[in-house]
Image (cartoon, helix red, strand yellow):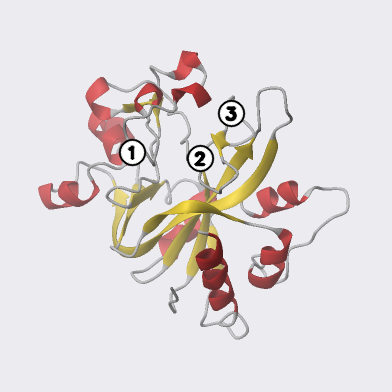
Amino acid sequence: MTSGGRIYLANVGANASHSFDSPIYDDGTFEFITIPEDRDLPGDHAIRFGQLTSYYDSKKPIRDYIPKRLWDFPTHFDPEFETFTYGDNCEVSPRAASLKRMEAGDFIFFLARLTRQEDKKSAKEHGFYLVGFLEIEDILKDVTQRPTDAEMKRYGTNAHILRGLSDDSLWDRFWVFGGSANSTRFHRAVPVTRELALQVFSSADGSPWKWDSGRSDLQVIGSYTRSCRCVIDPAIPGQDEKAPILWDWVQKHS
């Protein structure tokens, strides 16, 4: 499981600002719960929280992890690991601007905050994990109108497309990335630890991440992953050695 493509990182899913968590279990299996939409959407252009089911058993709902008040509210189901797409507002959001540099053959890894809790009385244990990746195969760029029928066939289930179909004002220059058949949602979450980060990740200027004594590992990882960006470029001297380390780590844990 190795490749020479660049590796990007995107922080996705429920986080500390939400009133629910994506759960991880003792064996490393997990449920990835996406964020709420920023508005209600028509029924035929939305997936609602109450419709979400377990990755491991499609007949098992996971709404027990989500506040009941949100069961009828739409979730921004992105990334989605069925047709392997991911959308972002690359033209208008500084957080996602670097994704415009992605090309076919690059990878985008998805980082999510997952939570372990033995029972409702025990303390929650939060951590960051890799939950899957797309190997970029094709890209729908700067979308300002309904895509063609051929494009709809490829990208039509992505949350940004569904938003646009519900309201013409939401063809808001987003991009959608399509993954190849090598793309995957991991069966087990892959922990992102200080050990891993020291070996493979660097800041935008190429320097190692700084682990301040006044911040937890969770806070440091969160601060460095607020924006989507390239974290490993094998074409840069010294970084070509980092990609195999990451791929080996993924294979070991996923």
Indicate the amino acid at tag 1.
Ala
Separation of residues labelled 1 and 3 (CA atoms): 19 Å
Pointer 1 or 2: first along the chain: 2
Q: Can you tell which mark lies on residue 180? A: none
Are there few (<14), some (14-19), or many (20+) residues within 10 Å of tag 3?
few
Kindly identify the residue that appears in the image at 63 percent across and 70 percent down.
Answer: 200
In the rendered view, tell whether residue 82 sits above or below residue 170: below
Along the line of sight, the residue nearer the viewer: 190 or 200:
190
For the residues labelled 2 and 3, say whether their Cβ atoms are less than 8 Å apart. no
Q: Is residue 165 above or below residue 138?
A: above
Image quarter hosting the N terminus: bottom left
Q: What amino acid type should be assigned to the residue bearing mark 2?
A: Gly
Q: Earlier in the sequence, mark 2 or mark 3?
A: 2
> Residue reaching furthest top?
69
Residue named by callout 2: 13
| Mark pair 2, 3: CA separation | 10 Å
Q: Report the side of 121 relative to 26 (left or right).
A: right
